[in-house]
Amino acid sequence: IKGLLKTPSLLCEKAFVAGEWTDAESGATFDVVNPARGDVIAKVPDLSRAEVAKAIDAADKARHHWAAKTGKERANILRKWFDLMMQHQEDLAIIMTAEQGKPLAESRGEVAYGASFIEWFGEEAKRVYGETIPGHQSDKRITVIRQPIGVAASITPWNFPIAMITRKAGPALAAGCSFVGRPASQTPLSALAIAKLAEEAGVPKGVLSIVTSEDASGVGKEFCENPQVRKLTFTGSTQVGRILLKQAADQVMKCSMELGGNAPFIVFDDADLDAAVEGAIQCKFRNNGQTCVCANRIYVQSGVYDAFAEKLKVAVGKLKVGDGLQDGTDLGPLIEPKASDKVKEHLKDALDKGATLLLGGDENQLGEQFLNPTIVTGATPDMKVSKEETFGPFAPLFKFETEDDVIAMANDTIFGLASYFYAKDLSRVVKVQEALEYGIVGVNTGIISTEVAPFGGVKQSGLGREGSRHGIEDYLEMKYICTSV
Ligand code: ADP
């Protein structure tokens, strides 16, 4: 893919440790594979735990100088980083599609979305306000200041190779923390490319490291056990989140967790059906269904069930499956064969338990990682898809009768990240948006992600919020100063 890039040096095959571009001391590497074609597009260093510790040590040394800069100084560097990401949007998008598979148009969108966190939090760097509190005794003056936590370590997944990192690195660096990130081993190239731009923007040596390693659990242990790390931020499955929280408990480490979802998407009788179909497609099939806010369960009220199913079938039937690098592709490959297996398993389970296939249900001729978008009707709560995230292009339609029924079904899950519903009646809208036990509710929209709003889940979907003015809080500690005068 180097030949496709205007700036070929953005494709880095070295890790970024303590401000140096480096190989693993052992010489070990791992392959980065293009999921559409199965070919190896790059090899990156497989760093050891000791090399990860070196990045942490450098971060710990660099953080003091970084924190001592004014918010505006940090903001200026972050602004440059944002500008560079946008200048190189096309190259970053090509790298992303090559390693992740999503259509180029979605990759371009993600570069802009990912960069927006750097811009937003750079601006917020100037607004880390404290507080004064009237003293409790006449000689006492009380001040509250907010300071950077220290070294932040991050573990991120492959579904948004840039945005999942910038959502964390943006607020961390803005707050004055240093940052060591481990990208998913499927998608390290996007992370390394943006690190290259961070370096060019003037982020000082050691303040940002990107440690590539296939040994996720070893890196996770280093992050949790190394006393120089003060903050762990993770996006991924609830299962791995639980492991990390347990590990982090030994050091009483502050943790942010963006974990799994099982998003309900509800269509009421009074919904604008065309808008609901459009929203369902955006939120079910974006990134080929591989996002934690993708609709997993689509509930449709009985009066519009058949009409909605028919409209959805027509619209989904137009989606084109293909290589993300080719024009006109709507749905790329799934990230790896086991991702396809999970979708097939959910589909089989649904059909075995009585669902009816409305569309798709088979592999595309392009190969096992390409699935044709699939819809079933007659989904029921005993099916796997009702409890677990499918993470693929499979839309099960459940039928419901009343508001109370659907609220109960929607909330009947351990997860609580995103939820969506379409309705017009004002009292219904207010009732349902308040009753859904989710961190995010999309009302008459299927797209909710933006850097200006707090993204995060309740229940077992996570801890903390990313984006908005609240996103920086996760990287700050409050200090109460009591002064006797
Ligand atoms: P996904 O299904 O999205 O890959 P995971 O939770 O399995 O979700 O993975 C999210 C990230 O966490 C990936 O970068 C993965 O390599 C990493 N990971 C997986 N297991 C562990 C672990 N035990 N400790 C630390 N990181 C892990």
Image: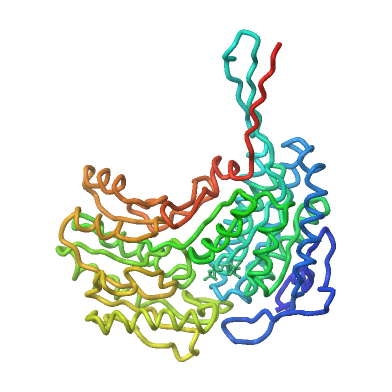
Q: Ligand 1 falls in which quarter?
A: bottom right
Residue 98 occupies which quadrant of the picture? bottom right
Q: Is residue 276 left or right of residue 119?
A: left
Quadrant housing the C terminus: top right
Q: How is the image coloured?
A: rainbow
Query: Where residue 100 sits in the image (x, y, percent)?
Result: 59, 74
Q: Is residue 415 left or right of residue 378?
A: right
Query: Where residue 180 sits in the image (x, y, percent)?
Result: 72, 57
Vertical side of 314 occupied by 411: above or below: above
- For the point 63% across and 55% down, which residue is it? 166
Between 36 and 469, the one nearer to me in the picture: 469
Between 74 and 79, the one nearer to me in the picture: 74
Between 231 and 89, the one nearer to me in the picture: 231
- For the point 76% across and 40% down, which residue is it? 67
Query: Where residue 412 sits in the image (x, y, percent)?
Result: 30, 60
Quadrant housing the N terminus: bottom right
Q: Is residue 210 left or right of residue 470?
A: right
